[in-house]
């Protein structure tokens, strides 16, 4: 249980008192709840059902539900790779890496929306890959997923933004080669802190005095990078360049595998995971030659950067909890890159045989 877990539990009790009348539930304390309670519907409904069916054992029931979602996440992970025609043996080699991922070992144990949300993000990734392979977009599937994402967590906004952006970009006649994709993300990575600092100034000049807005701007004024980790903070900003630098550090630290309070095992596993993903991106950038694989990399990179940028602007949690939803999509890079290497080796062997003949 965490502080958010306690809130979910109280809201679930209220929903049960209202006999699961969602209209009345969304209407309670409108002035207090911003955003609407609709944005927490899925986890609250599931907790409420667990309380009604399992009574005092509801926490264990919710834990089992999270573990079931981990299991189905592995299935969707595998199905996504099979769509791209990654060899089963390479997929099998990747599964132990998921099992030792610190994020997978940590967050499903909590009475939170994280596992539900991460599962939905992985489904989004699967549906996008399917649309890439079949070269056809199923708008109904995307609509249902968007509604579920919104009902699972308010911070699903960057994921929905990426879905809409990808649908729009996929309609354009763009060359999805590695060079164009890498240049696009380099420009996006450099411009993101600048954009965030400009948004900060607009909010500060036009919306100061609102408590929740002040909560965001005050953290910047304090030089906060990682929430509740003062060692990561910098000097209070004096100008727009300092503010931009704060957002730049936040964006980098969103992917940081190290923290002073982490155990050696925690750091080793995080660094190992980080290096595998980085190496996989490097392999793809040099040897990838499939448009469908390039589009898959493009979507996952856009998803990761969008989530990182959003939380860099809002808040990066003490334990990097908000990074959890993009871990499984990023781990897809590992078996795909291994497949790229094997295809490259087989291609060279084939060329050698042709020369010999």
Image: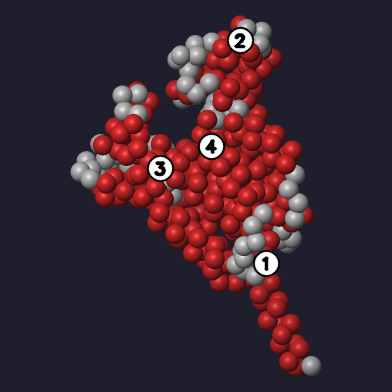
Gap in Å between the C-alphas at discs 4 and 2?
25 Å
Residue at mark 4: 157
Residue at mark 3: 312
Gap in Å between the C-alphas at discs 4 and 3?
14 Å
Q: Secondary structure at mark 3?
A: helix
Q: Are marks 1 and 3 in contact (CB under 8 Å)?
A: no
Q: Position of residue 138 (x, y in %)?
A: 75, 44
Check disc 4: other Cα within 10 Å, few if <14, some if 14-19, many if 20+: some
Specify which label sits upstream in the sequence, 2 or 1: 2
Q: Secondary structure at mark 4?
A: helix
Specify which label sits upstream in the sequence, 2 or 3: 2
Q: Is residue 144 above or below residue 78?
A: above
Gap in Å between the C-alphas at discs 2 and 1?
51 Å
Q: Are marks 4 and 3 in contact (CB under 8 Å)?
A: no
Q: Is residue 92 above or below residue 4?
A: below
> Disc 4 vs disc 1: which is toward the camera?
4
For residue 24, which numbered disc appears in the image? 2
State the residue at coordinates (36%, 50%): 194
Q: Secondary structure at mark 2?
A: helix
Gap in Å between the C-alphas at discs 1 and 3?
32 Å
């Amino acid at each position: 249980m965490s502080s958010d877990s306690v809130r979910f539990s109280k809201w679930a009790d209220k929903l049960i008192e209202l006999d699961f009348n969602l209209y009345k539930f969304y209407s309670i304390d409108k002035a207090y709840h911003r955003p609407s309670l609709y944005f927490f519907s899925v986890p609250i409904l599931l907790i409420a059902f667990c309380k009604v069916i399992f009574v005092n054992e509801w926490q264990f029931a919710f834990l089992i539900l999270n573990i079931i979602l981990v299991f189905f996440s592995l299935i969707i992970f595998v199905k996504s790779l099979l769509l791209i025609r990654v060899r089963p043996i390479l997929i099998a080699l990747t599964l132990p890496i998921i099992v030792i991922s610190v994020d997978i070992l940590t967050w499903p144990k909590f009475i939170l929306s994280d596992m539900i949300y991460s599962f939905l993000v992985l489904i989004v990734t699967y549906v996008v890959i399917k649309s890439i392979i079949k070269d056809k977009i199923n708008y109904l599937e995307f609509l249902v997923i968007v509604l579920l994402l919104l009902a699972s967590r308010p911070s699903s906004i960057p994921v929905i933004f990426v879905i809409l952006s990808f649908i729009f970009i996929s309609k354009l006649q763009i060359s999805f080669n590695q060079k164009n994709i890498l240049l696009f993300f380099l420009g996006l990575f450099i411009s993101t802190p600048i954009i965030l600092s400009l948004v900060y100034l607009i909010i500060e000049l036009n919306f100061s005095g609102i408590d929740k807005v002040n909560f965001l701007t005050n953290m910047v004024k304090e030089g906060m990078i990682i929430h509740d980790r003062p060692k990561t903070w910098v000097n209070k900003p004096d100008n727009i360049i300092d503010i931009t630098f704060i957002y730049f550090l936040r964006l980098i630290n969103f992917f940081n595998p190290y923290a002073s309070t982490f155990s050696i095992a925690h750091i080793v596993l995080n660094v190992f995971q980080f290096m595998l993903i980085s190496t996989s991106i490097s392999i793809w950038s040099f040897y990838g030659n499939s448009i469908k694989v390039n589009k898959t990399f493009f979507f996952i990179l856009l998803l990761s950067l969008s989530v990182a940028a959003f939380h860099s602007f809002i808040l990066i949690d003490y334990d990097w909890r908000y990074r959890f939803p993009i871990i499984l999509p990023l781990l897809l890079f590992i078996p795909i890159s291994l497949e790229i290497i094997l295809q490259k080796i087989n291609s060279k062997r084939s060329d050698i045989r042709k020369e010999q003949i």
